Protein backbone atom coordinates (compact mmCIF):
# COMPACT_ATOMS: atom_id res chain seq x y z
CA UNK A 1 0.00 0.00 0.00
CA UNK A 2 3.02 2.28 -0.27
CA UNK A 3 2.38 3.30 -3.84
CA UNK A 4 -0.32 5.90 -4.23
CA UNK A 5 -1.82 5.89 -7.68
CA UNK A 6 -3.29 9.04 -9.13
CA UNK A 7 -6.96 8.92 -8.15
CA UNK A 8 -8.93 7.66 -11.15
CA UNK A 9 -12.20 6.89 -9.41
CA UNK A 10 -14.89 8.97 -7.78
CA UNK A 11 -17.32 8.18 -4.99
CA UNK A 12 -19.46 10.79 -3.26
CA UNK A 13 -19.86 9.86 0.42
CA UNK A 14 -23.38 10.06 1.86
CA UNK A 15 -24.68 11.75 5.02
CA UNK A 16 -21.21 13.11 5.76
CA UNK A 17 -22.20 15.91 8.15
CA UNK A 18 -24.67 13.66 9.95
CA UNK A 19 -22.04 10.90 10.37
CA UNK A 20 -19.46 13.33 11.75
CA UNK A 21 -21.94 15.00 14.11
CA UNK A 22 -23.17 11.69 15.54
CA UNK A 23 -19.97 9.63 15.52
CA UNK A 24 -17.31 11.90 16.96
CA UNK A 25 -17.29 12.16 20.74
CA UNK A 26 -13.58 12.66 21.39
CA UNK A 27 -11.56 14.85 19.04
CA UNK A 28 -8.34 13.13 20.03
CA UNK A 29 -9.82 9.65 19.89
CA UNK A 30 -9.24 6.51 17.81
CA UNK A 31 -11.68 5.97 14.95
CA UNK A 32 -12.20 3.02 12.61
CA UNK A 33 -13.63 3.48 9.16
CA UNK A 34 -14.49 -0.15 8.42
CA UNK A 35 -15.54 0.55 4.82
CA UNK A 36 -12.85 3.00 3.79
CA UNK A 37 -13.58 3.00 0.04
CA UNK A 38 -12.01 6.12 -1.44
CA UNK A 39 -11.78 7.67 2.01
CA UNK A 40 -14.53 10.27 1.59
CA UNK A 41 -15.94 9.80 5.08
CA UNK A 42 -12.48 9.43 6.59
CA UNK A 43 -11.34 12.70 5.08
CA UNK A 44 -14.36 14.49 6.55
CA UNK A 45 -13.83 12.81 9.93
CA UNK A 46 -10.13 13.71 9.85
CA UNK A 47 -10.91 17.37 9.19
CA UNK A 48 -12.87 17.48 12.46
CA UNK A 49 -10.28 15.69 14.64
CA UNK A 50 -7.19 16.93 16.46
CA UNK A 51 -3.78 16.06 15.09
CA UNK A 52 -3.18 13.55 17.93
CA UNK A 53 -6.21 11.43 16.93
CA UNK A 54 -5.81 8.10 15.12
CA UNK A 55 -7.67 6.82 12.07
CA UNK A 56 -7.83 3.19 10.97
CA UNK A 57 -9.20 2.51 7.49
CA UNK A 58 -10.29 -1.00 6.51
CA UNK A 59 -11.45 -2.14 3.09
CA UNK A 60 -11.34 -5.58 1.54
CA UNK A 61 -11.02 -4.10 -1.93
CA UNK A 62 -7.40 -3.13 -2.53
CA UNK A 63 -8.29 -1.09 -5.60
CA UNK A 64 -10.08 1.30 -3.22
CA UNK A 65 -7.29 1.70 -0.66
CA UNK A 66 -4.54 2.29 -3.20
CA UNK A 67 -6.40 5.32 -4.53
CA UNK A 68 -6.03 7.25 -1.29
CA UNK A 69 -3.34 9.83 -0.68
CA UNK A 70 -2.48 9.53 3.07
CA UNK A 71 -1.07 13.07 3.11
CA UNK A 72 -4.71 14.24 2.98
CA UNK A 73 -5.06 13.45 6.67
CA UNK A 74 -2.95 15.01 9.38
CA UNK A 75 -3.53 12.27 11.97
CA UNK A 76 -1.85 8.86 12.25
CA UNK A 77 -3.53 6.73 9.58
CA UNK A 78 -3.40 2.92 9.38
CA UNK A 79 -4.85 1.37 6.22
CA UNK A 80 -5.62 -2.36 6.21
CA UNK A 81 -6.83 -4.42 3.28
CA UNK A 82 -9.06 -7.01 4.93
CA UNK A 83 -12.66 -7.88 5.66
CA UNK A 84 -14.16 -5.81 8.47
CA UNK A 85 -15.14 -9.09 10.15
CA UNK A 86 -11.44 -9.14 11.18
CA UNK A 87 -11.83 -5.90 13.16
CA UNK A 88 -10.51 -7.45 16.38
CA UNK A 89 -7.46 -8.84 14.58
CA UNK A 90 -6.67 -5.45 13.02
CA UNK A 91 -6.82 -3.78 16.44
CA UNK A 92 -4.75 -6.56 18.05
CA UNK A 93 -2.06 -6.11 15.43
CA UNK A 94 -1.99 -2.38 16.21
CA UNK A 95 -1.88 -3.19 19.95
CA UNK A 96 -5.13 -1.33 20.51
CA UNK A 97 -7.87 -2.62 22.80
CA UNK A 98 -10.52 0.09 22.55
CA UNK A 99 -11.66 2.70 20.04
CA UNK A 100 -13.93 5.75 20.25
CA UNK A 101 -15.92 5.29 17.09
CA UNK A 102 -16.56 2.88 14.24
CA UNK A 103 -18.18 3.69 10.92
CA UNK A 104 -19.61 1.12 8.51
CA UNK A 105 -20.89 2.52 5.21
CA UNK A 106 -22.10 -0.77 3.78
CA UNK A 107 -22.32 -1.99 0.23
CA UNK A 108 -20.10 -1.13 -2.67
CA UNK A 109 -18.47 1.98 -3.96
CA UNK A 110 -19.59 3.72 -7.14
CA UNK A 111 -16.44 2.89 -9.10
CA UNK A 112 -16.89 -0.86 -8.53
CA UNK A 113 -20.54 -0.62 -9.54
CA UNK A 114 -19.57 1.25 -12.71
CA UNK A 115 -16.81 -1.20 -13.65
CA UNK A 116 -18.25 -3.84 -16.03
CA UNK A 117 -15.39 -6.20 -15.15
CA UNK A 118 -16.72 -6.53 -11.58
CA UNK A 119 -20.15 -7.79 -12.72
CA UNK A 120 -22.16 -5.87 -10.07
CA UNK A 121 -24.41 -3.83 -12.40
CA UNK A 122 -27.22 -5.43 -14.37
CA UNK A 123 -27.08 -2.55 -16.84
CA UNK A 124 -23.49 -3.36 -17.90
CA UNK A 125 -22.15 -6.47 -19.60
CA UNK A 126 -19.22 -8.19 -17.96
CA UNK A 127 -18.13 -11.40 -16.25
CA UNK A 128 -20.34 -12.85 -13.51
CA UNK A 129 -17.91 -12.02 -10.73
CA UNK A 130 -19.38 -9.78 -7.96
CA UNK A 131 -16.53 -10.31 -5.47
CA UNK A 132 -15.57 -7.36 -3.27
CA UNK A 133 -12.33 -9.17 -2.53
CA UNK A 134 -10.98 -10.63 -5.74
CA UNK A 135 -8.75 -13.07 -3.91
CA UNK A 136 -11.85 -14.99 -2.71
CA UNK A 137 -12.72 -18.15 -4.62
CA UNK A 138 -16.50 -17.91 -4.78
CA UNK A 139 -17.81 -15.88 -7.73
CA UNK A 140 -21.33 -15.22 -8.99
CA UNK A 141 -20.53 -17.54 -11.90
CA UNK A 142 -20.03 -20.45 -9.50
CA UNK A 143 -23.23 -19.65 -7.62
CA UNK A 144 -25.31 -19.27 -10.80
CA UNK A 145 -23.99 -22.47 -12.40
CA UNK A 146 -23.35 -24.80 -9.51
CA UNK A 147 -26.02 -24.16 -6.87
CA UNK A 148 -29.18 -26.28 -7.04
CA UNK A 149 -32.46 -24.76 -8.26
CA UNK A 150 -33.75 -24.77 -4.66
CA UNK A 151 -30.64 -22.99 -3.37
CA UNK A 152 -30.93 -20.35 -6.10
CA UNK A 153 -34.60 -19.76 -5.32
CA UNK A 154 -33.81 -19.49 -1.61
CA UNK A 155 -31.02 -16.92 -2.16
CA UNK A 156 -33.12 -14.82 -4.52
CA UNK A 157 -36.04 -14.88 -2.09
CA UNK A 158 -34.09 -14.37 1.12
CA UNK A 159 -31.41 -11.90 0.03
CA UNK A 160 -33.30 -10.19 -2.80
CA UNK A 161 -36.79 -10.33 -1.27
CA UNK A 162 -37.97 -11.12 -4.80
CA UNK A 163 -41.43 -12.71 -5.17
CA UNK A 164 -40.62 -14.43 -8.48
CA UNK A 165 -37.66 -16.29 -7.00
CA UNK A 166 -38.78 -19.80 -8.00
CA UNK A 167 -39.56 -18.81 -11.57
CA UNK A 168 -36.21 -17.03 -11.96
CA UNK A 169 -34.30 -19.97 -10.44
CA UNK A 170 -36.07 -22.37 -12.84
CA UNK A 171 -35.14 -20.17 -15.81
CA UNK A 172 -31.48 -19.99 -14.75
CA UNK A 173 -31.33 -23.77 -14.48
CA UNK A 174 -32.99 -24.19 -17.91
CA UNK A 175 -30.55 -21.77 -19.51
CA UNK A 176 -27.47 -23.36 -17.98
CA UNK A 177 -28.34 -26.84 -19.31
CA UNK A 178 -27.30 -25.70 -22.78
CA UNK A 179 -24.36 -23.48 -21.81
CA UNK A 180 -22.51 -22.37 -18.66
CA UNK A 181 -23.61 -18.81 -17.83
CA UNK A 182 -20.54 -16.60 -17.54
CA UNK A 183 -21.76 -13.07 -18.31
CA UNK A 184 -23.91 -10.65 -16.35
CA UNK A 185 -26.14 -10.10 -19.39
CA UNK A 186 -27.02 -13.82 -19.33
CA UNK A 187 -28.23 -13.50 -15.75
CA UNK A 188 -30.07 -10.35 -16.82
CA UNK A 189 -31.82 -12.34 -19.62
CA UNK A 190 -32.83 -15.09 -17.21
CA UNK A 191 -34.50 -12.53 -14.94
CA UNK A 192 -36.00 -10.44 -17.73
CA UNK A 193 -37.62 -13.53 -19.24
CA UNK A 194 -39.18 -14.52 -15.90
CA UNK A 195 -40.87 -11.34 -14.69
CA UNK A 196 -43.49 -8.81 -15.73
CA UNK A 197 -41.71 -6.20 -17.93
CA UNK A 198 -43.27 -3.43 -15.85
CA UNK A 199 -41.26 -4.52 -12.80
CA UNK A 200 -38.19 -5.79 -14.64
CA UNK A 201 -35.66 -3.29 -13.34
CA UNK A 202 -36.77 -3.72 -9.72
CA UNK A 203 -36.47 -7.50 -10.06
CA UNK A 204 -33.08 -7.18 -11.72
CA UNK A 205 -31.82 -4.98 -8.90
CA UNK A 206 -33.11 -7.45 -6.30
CA UNK A 207 -31.62 -10.52 -8.01
CA UNK A 208 -28.20 -8.92 -8.55
CA UNK A 209 -28.24 -7.76 -4.92
CA UNK A 210 -29.07 -11.31 -3.80
CA UNK A 211 -26.14 -12.87 -5.65
CA UNK A 212 -23.78 -10.14 -4.44
CA UNK A 213 -24.83 -10.81 -0.83
CA UNK A 214 -24.27 -14.56 -1.27
CA UNK A 215 -20.89 -14.18 -2.98
CA UNK A 216 -19.57 -11.83 -0.29
CA UNK A 217 -21.28 -13.50 2.72
CA UNK A 218 -22.57 -10.04 3.53
CA UNK A 219 -25.11 -11.09 6.15
CA UNK A 220 -22.67 -13.26 8.09
CA UNK A 221 -19.87 -10.68 8.08
CA UNK A 222 -22.24 -7.91 9.16
CA UNK A 223 -23.46 -10.04 12.08
CA UNK A 224 -19.85 -10.72 13.08
CA UNK A 225 -18.67 -7.12 12.90
CA UNK A 226 -21.70 -5.81 14.81
CA UNK A 227 -20.83 -8.15 17.68
CA UNK A 228 -17.11 -7.40 17.58
CA UNK A 229 -17.69 -3.64 17.38
CA UNK A 230 -19.55 -3.65 20.69
CA UNK A 231 -16.63 -5.46 22.33
CA UNK A 232 -14.00 -2.95 21.19
CA UNK A 233 -15.88 0.32 21.75
CA UNK A 234 -14.78 2.35 24.77
CA UNK A 235 -17.65 3.39 27.08
CA UNK A 236 -19.24 6.40 25.38
CA UNK A 237 -17.79 5.33 22.01
CA UNK A 238 -20.16 5.09 19.08
CA UNK A 239 -20.98 2.76 16.22
CA UNK A 240 -22.51 4.33 13.10
CA UNK A 241 -23.89 2.13 10.32
CA UNK A 242 -25.19 3.29 6.94
CA UNK A 243 -27.18 0.62 5.12
CA UNK A 244 -28.72 0.67 1.67
CA UNK A 245 -31.29 -2.12 1.74
CA UNK A 246 -33.94 -3.28 4.15
CA UNK A 247 -32.26 -6.59 4.99
CA UNK A 248 -29.17 -4.85 6.36
CA UNK A 249 -31.10 -2.06 8.02
CA UNK A 250 -33.33 -4.60 9.83
CA UNK A 251 -30.23 -6.41 11.12
CA UNK A 252 -28.70 -3.21 12.46
CA UNK A 253 -31.98 -2.06 13.98
CA UNK A 254 -32.58 -5.43 15.69
CA UNK A 255 -28.99 -5.62 16.94
CA UNK A 256 -29.13 -2.11 18.43
CA UNK A 257 -32.55 -2.80 19.98
CA UNK A 258 -31.54 -6.14 21.50
CA UNK A 259 -28.32 -4.81 23.00
CA UNK A 260 -30.00 -1.73 24.43
CA UNK A 261 -32.62 -3.72 26.34
CA UNK A 262 -32.71 -3.57 30.10
CA UNK A 263 -34.34 -6.64 31.63
CA UNK A 264 -33.42 -6.64 35.35
CA UNK A 265 -33.41 -9.78 37.45
CA UNK A 266 -36.83 -10.79 38.82
CA UNK A 267 -37.53 -13.69 41.17
CA UNK A 268 -37.63 -17.00 39.29
CA UNK A 269 -35.89 -15.65 36.17
CA UNK A 270 -33.25 -17.65 34.33
CA UNK A 271 -29.83 -15.98 33.97
CA UNK A 272 -30.29 -16.04 30.18
CA UNK A 273 -33.43 -13.87 30.51
CA UNK A 274 -31.60 -11.04 32.29
CA UNK A 275 -30.36 -8.30 29.99
CA UNK A 276 -27.95 -5.47 30.73
CA UNK A 277 -27.94 -2.71 28.13
CA UNK A 278 -24.50 -2.51 26.54
CA UNK A 279 -25.69 -0.06 23.89
CA UNK A 280 -27.76 3.11 24.01
CA UNK A 281 -29.53 4.05 20.79
CA UNK A 282 -28.58 7.55 19.65
CA UNK A 283 -30.90 7.50 16.63
CA UNK A 284 -34.49 6.37 17.11
CA UNK A 285 -35.63 6.41 13.52
CA UNK A 286 -32.80 6.12 11.02
CA UNK A 287 -31.31 9.34 9.68
CA UNK A 288 -31.95 9.72 5.94
CA UNK A 289 -30.56 12.10 3.34
CA UNK A 290 -32.17 15.47 2.64
CA UNK A 291 -33.87 16.00 -0.72
CA UNK A 292 -30.98 18.35 -1.63
CA UNK A 293 -28.42 15.61 -1.02
CA UNK A 294 -30.47 13.05 -2.99
CA UNK A 295 -30.71 15.48 -5.90
CA UNK A 296 -26.91 15.79 -5.94
CA UNK A 297 -26.18 12.13 -5.21
CA UNK A 298 -28.97 9.66 -6.12
CA UNK A 299 -27.16 6.85 -4.20
CA UNK A 300 -28.11 8.68 -1.01
CA UNK A 301 -31.81 7.96 -1.63
CA UNK A 302 -31.76 4.54 0.01
CA UNK A 303 -29.17 5.33 2.72
CA UNK A 304 -30.22 4.85 6.35
CA UNK A 305 -27.89 5.82 9.18
CA UNK A 306 -28.27 4.33 12.65
CA UNK A 307 -25.98 5.17 15.57
CA UNK A 308 -25.59 3.57 19.00
CA UNK A 309 -23.31 4.33 21.94
CA UNK A 310 -21.46 1.86 24.17
CA UNK A 311 -22.61 2.04 27.77
CA UNK A 312 -20.27 1.50 30.68
CA UNK A 313 -21.91 -1.86 31.56
CA UNK A 314 -19.87 -5.00 31.01
CA UNK A 315 -21.20 -7.38 28.38
CA UNK A 316 -22.71 -10.68 29.70
C1 LIG B 1 -20.18 2.40 0.15
S1 LIG B 1 -18.48 2.08 -0.02
C2 LIG B 1 -17.75 3.14 1.19
C3 LIG B 1 -17.35 4.45 0.64
C4 LIG B 1 -16.60 5.31 1.63
N1 LIG B 1 -17.39 5.61 2.79
C5 LIG B 1 -16.13 6.59 0.96
O1 LIG B 1 -16.52 7.66 1.42
O2 LIG B 1 -15.37 6.53 0.00
C6 LIG B 1 -18.30 0.56 0.78
C7 LIG B 1 -16.87 0.05 0.80
O3 LIG B 1 -16.82 -0.98 1.77
C8 LIG B 1 -16.09 -2.05 1.27
N2 LIG B 1 -16.63 -3.23 1.94
C9 LIG B 1 -17.86 -3.77 1.81
N3 LIG B 1 -17.98 -4.83 2.61
C10 LIG B 1 -16.79 -4.95 3.28
C11 LIG B 1 -16.31 -5.85 4.25
N4 LIG B 1 -17.05 -6.87 4.68
N5 LIG B 1 -15.07 -5.67 4.73
C12 LIG B 1 -14.28 -4.64 4.29
N6 LIG B 1 -14.68 -3.76 3.34
C13 LIG B 1 -15.93 -3.92 2.85
C14 LIG B 1 -16.29 -2.04 -0.23
O4 LIG B 1 -15.19 -2.62 -0.88
C15 LIG B 1 -16.40 -0.55 -0.50
O5 LIG B 1 -15.16 0.03 -0.87
Image (spheres, grey):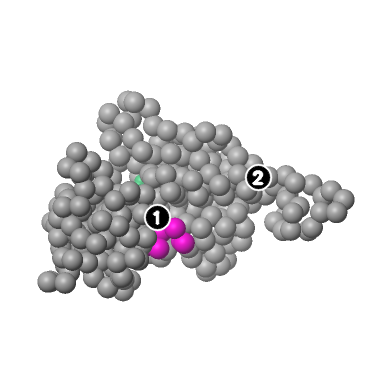
Q: Quadrant of residue 245?
A: top left
Could you tell me how far apart the alpha carbons at marks 1 and 2 are, in whole angstroms?
A: 27 Å
Tell me if 198 is positioned left or right of 290 in this view: left
Give residue 148's position: percent from left, percent from top. 31, 70
**Residue visible at 65% across and 45% down?**
260
Give residue 283's position: percent from left, percent from top. 55, 35
Give residue 124's position: percent from left, percent from top. 15, 52
Given the current orientation, which residue lies at the most extreme right position? 267
Neighbour class for label 1 at 10 Å: few (<14), some, many (≥20)? some
For the residue labelled by badge 2, is the local secondary structure a helix, a strand or a loop? loop
> In this rendering, is residue 242 above or below 233?
above
> In this rendering, is residue 122 above or below 290?
below
Q: Quadrant location of the N terminus? A: bottom left
Q: Main secondary structure of the magenta part?
A: helix
For the residue labelled by badge 1, is the local secondary structure a helix, a strand or a loop? helix
Q: Quadrant of residue 178?
A: bottom left
Q: Nearer the viewer, residue 159 or 19?
A: 159
* Residue 193 in magenta stretch: no
1 or 2: tag closer to the N-terminus:
1
The mark found on residue 260 in the picture is 2
Residue interval drawn in magenta: 216-221
* Residue annotated with mark 1: 158
Amino acid sequence: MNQVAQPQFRHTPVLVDEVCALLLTDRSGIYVDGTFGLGGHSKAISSRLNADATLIGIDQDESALTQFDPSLVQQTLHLRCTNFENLDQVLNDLKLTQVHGILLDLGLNSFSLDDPERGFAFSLSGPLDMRFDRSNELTAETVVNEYSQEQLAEIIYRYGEERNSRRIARRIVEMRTTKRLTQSNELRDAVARSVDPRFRNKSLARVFQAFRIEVNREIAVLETVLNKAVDVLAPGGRLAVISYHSLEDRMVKTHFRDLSQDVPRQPGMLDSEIKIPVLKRITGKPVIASSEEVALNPRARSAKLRVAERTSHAAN
